[in-house]
C-alpha cells in the first residue's frame, strides 16, 4: 500500500527529473565511449570524458554537488571537488605538461632546427579564429579561449579557458581533446587538398647524423625557460612545467622519475583530467547554440593551423633548390597533437611511397608544434588582459 501511494517522483526521482537535454548529453557520453573503444580515438581521454558525461547528466547525481532536502545544505560531489582541486588551480594540466616534457626527445629537432619554424606557422588558426570569434560577438577573453582550441593542446586550452572564460570550459575542453583524437580524420583531407601527389612524394632525410651532446640537451630546457620567462612571465607555468619534465628526462640522474612521469603520472592525471572535465558537461551548460558555435570555431581553427603549416612549407620550397625541398605534409605537424600528427604524416607518406620514411622530420616538426602551442598560450595569457 505504501509503495502504491508513492508517486514516481518519490520512488524514482532521477527518472522523474530526466529531461531531453539530459538524454542528449548521456548520448554524447555514449558516443565518446564508442569512439574511444571501437575506433581507438584517444581512449585515455575520451573514455573518462564520456563516462563522466553520463555521471553528471543523471538528475540528482551524487557526482555533482547537490542540496540535501532534509538539511538544506550543499553536499559536495566528488567531481566538483576534483574540479576545484585540479582544474581551477590548473594543477592537472600542469602535471600533464611534466609528463609530456618527459616524453619529448629534442635531439631530432637539434638535427633539423629549421623544422622548429613550423611550430610557429601552424599557430595561424589560433589568431584568425580569435578575430572571427570577436566578430561573432564574443569578448576578447572568450575569443582567445576559443581560438586556442586550434593549438590541438588540451592542457593549454584548459588553462587559458579556466582563466579567461570558465563558463565555456566544458565545450572548449571537449572540442580540444576531440579534435586531437580526430587528427587521423581531419588532417589528411586538408593536406591532400593543398598538395599535389608530386609534392607528397618528396623524400626527406632524417637530418644530420651527428650526435647531440648531453650538455646541449640539458641546457636547452633551462635556456628556453629563462628566455620565455623574461619575454612573457605569464607563460612560465606552461613552458616551465613542460621544460622541467624534459630536464627530468635528460639530466640522467632521475631515470626512475622520468619513467614514472612518462607512464604512471601521465596515465593517472589524464584519467582524472578526463573525468573531471566532464563535470562541466551538464545539459544546462552544453545544450546551447553557443556550444555548437564553439565546436565549429574550434574545427575552423584546427583546419587553419594545418593549412598554415602546409602553406608555409610550400613557401619555403620556393627558396630551396631541387633535391633539397621539404615535403609540404611535414608542415601539418606544426600543431601540438604530439605524436599523433607525426604518425599520421608518416603513414600518409608510406601510402604514397612505401619507401618514403617521414617519421623523423615529422617528429621534429611536431616537437616544434608542442613548443609553439605553449608559447602561443603564453602570449595570449600575457597580452589579452592588456586589451580586454
Image: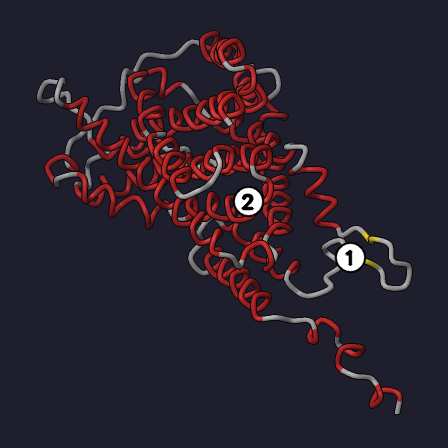
Viewer-side residue, 324 vs 259? 324
Compared with 106, 298 (above or below) is: below
Q: Are marks 1 and 2 in contact (CB under 8 Å)?
A: no
Compared with 300, 335 (above or below) is: above
Which residue is at 18% across, 39% downward?
194
Compared with 68, 366 (above or below) is: above
Compared with 114, 64 (above or below) is: below
Q: Answer with left or right where residue 247 lies relative to residue 205.
A: right
What residue is shown with label 2? Answer: 168
Helix or strand or loop: what does disc 1 sit on?
strand
Which of the 4 quarters of the picture holds residue 136? top left
Which of the 4 quarters of the picture holds residue 261? top right
Camera sees residue 339: no
Residue reaching furthest to the right: 71
What residue is shown with label 1? Answer: 66
State the mark number for residue 116.
Answer: none
Task: Residue 263: give x, y in percent of width and height.
Answer: 58, 36
Viewer-side residue, 226 vs 16? 16
The CA distance from mark 1 to mark 2 is: 22 Å
Which of the 4 quarters of the picture holds residue 126? top left
Camera sees residue 324: yes
Viewer-side residue, 112 vs 334? 334
Which residue is at 29% across, 27% downward?
361
Count of residue discs = 2
Which residue is at 32% across, 47% downward?
186
Please tell me which of labels 1 and 2 falls first in the chain. 1
Amino acid at each position: 500500500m505504501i509503495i502504491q501511494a508513492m508517486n514516481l517522483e518519490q520512488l524514482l526521482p532521477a527518472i522523474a527529473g530526466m529531461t531531453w537535454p539530459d538524454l542528449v548529453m548521456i548520448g554524447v557520453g555514449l558516443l565518446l565511449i564508442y569512439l574511444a573503444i571501437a575506433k581507438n580515438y584517444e581512449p585515455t581521454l575520451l573514455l573518462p570524458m564520456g563516462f563522466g558525461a553520463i555521471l553528471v547528466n543523471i538528475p540528482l547525481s551524487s557526482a555533482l554537488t547537490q542540496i540535501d532536502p532534509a538539511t538544506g545544505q550543499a553536499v559536495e560531489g566528488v567531481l566538483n571537488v576534483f574540479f576545484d582541486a585540479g582544474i581551477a588551480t590548473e594543477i592537472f594540466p600542469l602535471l600533464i605538461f611534466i609528463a609530456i616534457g618527459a616524453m619529448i626527445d629534442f635531439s631530432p629537432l637539434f638535427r633539423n632546427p629549421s623544422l622548429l619554424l613550423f611550430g610557429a606557422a601552424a599557430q595561424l588558426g589560433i589568431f584568425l579564429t580569435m578575430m572571427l570569434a570577436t566578430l561573432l560577438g564574443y569578448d576578447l577573453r572568450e575569443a582567445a579561449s576559443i581560438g586556442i582550441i586550434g593549438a590541438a593542446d588540451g592542457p593549454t586550452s584548459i588553462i587559458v579557458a579556466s582563466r579567461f572564460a570558465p563558463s565555456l570550459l566544458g565545450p572548449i575542453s571537449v572540442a580540444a581533446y576531440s579534435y586531437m583524437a580526430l587528427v587521423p580524420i581531419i588532417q589528411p583531407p586538408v593536406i591532400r587538398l593543398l598538395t599535389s601527389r608530386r609534392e607528397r612524394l618528396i623524400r626527406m632525410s632524417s637530418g644530420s647524423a651527428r650526435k647531440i651532446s648531453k650538455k646541449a640537451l640539458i641546457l636547452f630546457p633551462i635556456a628556453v625557460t629563462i628566455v620565455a620567462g623574461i619575454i612573457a612571465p605569464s607563460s612560465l607555468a606552461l613552458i616551465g612545467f613542460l621544460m622541467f619534465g624534459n630536464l627530468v628526462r635528460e639530466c640522467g640522474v632521475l631515470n626512475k622519475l622520468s619513467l614514472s612521469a612518462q607512464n604512471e603520472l601521465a596515465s593517472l592525471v589524464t584519467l582524472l583530467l578526463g573525468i573531471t572535465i566532464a563535470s562541466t558537461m551538464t545539459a544546462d551548460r552544453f545544450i546551447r547554440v553557443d556550444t555548437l558555435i564553439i565546436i565549429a570555431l574550434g574545427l575552423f581553427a584546427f583546419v587553419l593551423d594545418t593549412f598554415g603549416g602546409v602553406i608555409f612549407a610550400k613557401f619555403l620550397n620556393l627558396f630551396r633548390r631541387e633535391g633539397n625541398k621539404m615535403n609540404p605534409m611535414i608542415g601539418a605537424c606544426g600543431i601540438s597533437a604530439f605524436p599523433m600528427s607525426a604518425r599520421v604524416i608518416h603513414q600518409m607518406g608510406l601510402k604514397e611511397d612505401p619507401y618514403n620514411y617521414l617519421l623523423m622530420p615529422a617528429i621534429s616538426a611536431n616537437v616544434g608544434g608542442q613548443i609553439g602551442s605553449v608559447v602561443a598560450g603564453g602570449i595570449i595569457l600575457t597580452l589579452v588582459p592588456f586589451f580586454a
